[in-house]
Amino acid sequence: MKEADLDDQYGRFPEINRSEVQKFIEWIHAQPHISDRFSEGEALHFFHACRSSMEVAKQVLDTNLTARTHLDEFFVNLDCERPEIRRAMRTVSIVPLPGATPEGYRVILAKLDDLNTSNYNFADVMKLYCMVFDLWMYEDGIQPGHLIVIDLKGTSLGHVARIGLIQMKKFLFYLQEAAAIRLMGFHFINIVPFMDKILALMTPFMKKELSTVLHMHSDLNQFYKFVPKEMLPKEYEGQVEETSLVKEVYYKKLLDNRKEFLEFETRHQVNEKLRPGKAKNASDLFGIEGNFKKLDID
């Protein structure tokens, strides 16, 4: 894993005051429950995502690391050799696309490869998704914004039925409250007739800010207004290699950097025994899980 060059990042975003980021780093390293190996580059992602607000960055960082500690389904045991992760790699393509939109936004695309619902596990797929995203951001550095694209082609009601409300609540909490990105768009393409079932899982946990950047496209020509066609893989009439080939680049990086990523995992968790004040647990972040039931799909 090669971290993005700091001088290049500060050069591309001259509005960011490096001395303020240094103060942020000093605060991080003064927190007994946070790893002292947390790097300036990793801190910069939070400072940039929070638009240089020191207090907001502190809050989001702590929420991020706390969520990663207690969200076992998505952020614990990030070993790409584990059988459930290898199965997720066969089931889905998760592809950071080369280049950027005219606005400078970077794009990540996810789609099903194996349509067999018995091989689809939402938590494992989201764990793999976050691993790819983390590796991408670590190497890519801060950017003007990010677009998430989900291709629903081949998705069935059987896939939707395998997603629990609690899992969706936790993932959307992380995306909206803790992710160190400027999310400028969340796009569904090749939408399915039962899109209402998918939205029924999402909307109870979506804030207005996410709702305003959520887009659904049955017509790819409308989608191309957000992501230029030439940025996309060949199956979307673009100029990039097919997703099945591009995904192997990132999956191989995860495998090649297995030990580094396991260290990345521990660096992005907190030690609750050392937290000043009262230790936190999952219910502090997400409430009582028993209040939510699995969505009934008929």
Image: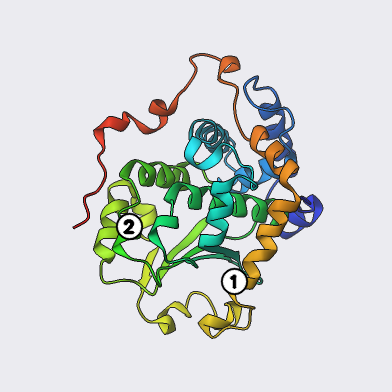
Q: Secondary structure at mark 2?
A: helix
**Where is residue 7 shown, x and y percent of the image?**
81, 52
Foreground residue among 125 and 217 = 125
Badge 1, how many Cα within 10 Å: few under 14, some, many 20+?
some
Q: Secondary structure at mark 1?
A: helix
Foreground residue among 227 and 158 = 158
Q: Quadrant of residue 103?
A: bottom right
**Where is residue 38 shown, x and y percent of the image?**
71, 34
Q: Residue at x 38, y 53 (%)?
A: 209
| Left or right position of 259 against 58 | right
| Left or right position of 205 against 220 | left
Badge 2, how many Cα within 10 Å: few under 14, some, many 20+?
many
Q: Quadrant of residue 173?
A: top left
Q: Is residue 100 visible?
A: no
Q: Is residue 254 above or below residue 19?
A: below
The residue tagged 1 is 244
**Where is residue 97 shown, x and y percent of the image?**
62, 69
The residue tagged 2 is 160
Q: Residue at x 70, y 58 (%)?
A: 252
Mark 2 and mark 1 in contact (Cβ < 8 Å)? no
Q: Residue at x 21, y 50 (%)?
A: 296
Q: Quadrant of residue 198?
A: bottom left
